[in-house]
Amino acid sequence: MWIGWIEFDLLLGDIRSLKEKRSVLRPLIAELSRRTEAAAAEVGEHDLHRRASIGVSIVASGSSHVRDVLDHAERLVADRPEITLLSVRRGLHSSED
């Protein structure tokens, strides 16, 4: 069993309120969940208008599948023109670690 996660540090576009921030993040998180079949959520920077941290995690039987899903999630986020991807952190662990 393999457990993988990826965390995105994001700079959002011209956002002036937390309500506007949610209107950008909610569809992104839904798309990540739907298209990667992994768990996705806002995991940090909750009180800042223009910054966000989004996390995606997956559990699978093979490490290559986990890597493929995390790569796909990164491409989905990087391809969003309204978002600047500042940094990405990843982790991959075996249940035997």
Image (tube, rainbow, N blue to C red):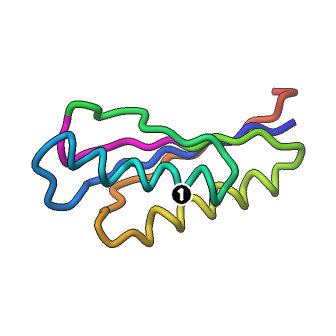
Q: Residue 96, located in which quarter of the rendered image?
A: top right
Q: In this image, 9 relative to 34: left or right?
A: left
- Label 1: few (<14), some (14–19) or many (≥20) C-alpha neighbours in 10 Å: some
Q: Hey, what amino acid is under mark 1?
A: Glu
Q: Nearer the viewer, residue 91 or 22?
A: 22
- Residue in view at x 43 percent, y 33 percent: 43
| Place of residue 3 in the rendered image (x, y in percent of width and height, measured from the top left) | 74, 37
Q: Is residue 52 magenta?
A: yes
- Residue in view at x 63 percent, y 62 percent: 71
Q: Nearer the viewer, residue 39 or 10?
A: 39
Q: Magenta span covers which residues?
A: 48-55
| Place of residue 68 in the rendered image (x, y in percent of width and height, measured from the top left) | 72, 61
Q: Residue 92, located in which quarter of the rendered image?
A: top right
Q: In this image, 75 relative to 65: left or right?
A: left
Q: How many marks?
A: 1
Q: Residue 32, located in which quarter of the rendered image?
A: bottom right
**Residue at mark 1:** 31
Q: In this image, 90 relative to 45: left or right?
A: right
| Place of residue 61 in the rendered image (x, y in percent of width and height, measured from the top left) | 89, 43
Q: Element at badge 1?
A: helix
Looking at the image, residue 78 lies above or below residue 27 = below
For this orientation, the residue located farthest to the left is: 16
